[in-house]
Image (cartoon, rainbow, N blue to C red):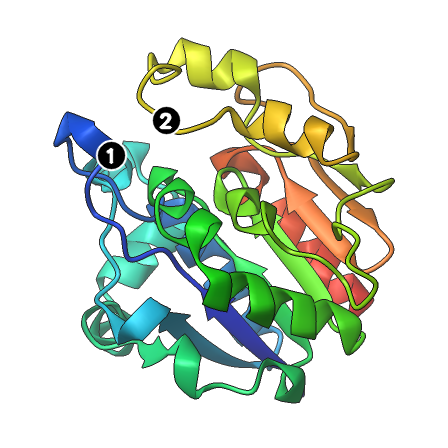
Amino acid sequence: MARILILSTAADVLGDTGNPTGVWYEELASPYYAFLDAGHDVTLVTLGGQPVPIDPNSDVTGDDAPASVTRFRADAAATALLKAPGRLEDEDVTAYDALYIPGGHGAMFDLAESALAAKAIGAAWDSGKVVASVCHGPAAFKNVVDANGVSIVKGRKVTAFTNSEEDAVGLTEAVPFLLETMLRELGATFEGVADWQPYAISDGRLVTGQNPASSEGAAQKVLTLL
């Protein structure tokens, strides 16, 4: 059994727009159950142990809802974690086998700018752990460097929510930076496919997924590495 730490955004407002945001439900729920169903121990944390907000655009029901979201919503233990996650500050990330960061636009506003998150991710990387993220989650890599002061994405193949997808949802002007552009500027070899198509890649211990539809694929790559 491996130990997996999930670091979620706790930001619930889309910058200066005042519009609600948060974590994208499928990007949290699909890997959460992929890890649990594989027999692993999963811990959910945020900065300061703040509640996990669900982006209302991802809180879908009925036939449109991913099976993992329907399952999560009906799971009392899982939904309780949203209200009272652990504190990243209290965790030794090196005691875990993998660190996974789901997306949702919220990550661009708290995780991307947090020195604490950057330090924790860097520590996980330097200690040989699997580091994974999906969609807007790689925003958390913005200021993460390894023990030599080099960005952990430099020279590595990564994917994330593309500039094309950001434009398609009409939020290019609302976000503090474009994720694809930022990763390229950090020296990553950015790869992407057509909008909304599933795409997950691993480069060594670094796993990334392009969009919500890539959540399951990214989780499976984490499990393969574990």
Q: Is residue 218 visible?
A: yes
**Point 58% across, 68% down: residue:** 119
The disc label shown at residue 175, or none: 2
Q: Position of residue 217 (x, y in %)?
A: 65, 46
Question: Quick one: label 1 or label 2, which is nearer the N terminus?
Answer: 1
Q: Is residue 187 left or right of residue 121?
A: right
Query: Residue 119 or 191: which is nearer the viewer?
Result: 119
Assess whether mark 2 and mark 1 are in contact (beta carbons under 8 angstroms): yes
Instruction: Give the residue type that dot 2 points to.
Output: Val
Locate the C terminus and report the quarter of the image it occupies.
bottom right
Q: CA distance from mark 1 to mark 2?
A: 7 Å
Crowding at mark 1 (Cα within 10 Å: few <14, some 14-19, many 20+): some
Locate the N terminus and report the quarter of the image it occupies. Answer: bottom right
> What residue sits 71% from the left and 27% below the top?
184
Numbered disc total: 2
Residue 80 is drawn in which quadrant? Answer: bottom left
- Residue 88 x %, y %: 42, 76
Work out whether 104 lies above or below 204. Answer: above
Residue 15, label in figure: 1
The one of 65 and 151 positioned closer to us in this rendering:
151
The label number, if any, that marks residue 31 in the structure image: none
**Which kind of residue does numbered mark 1 sit on?**
Gly
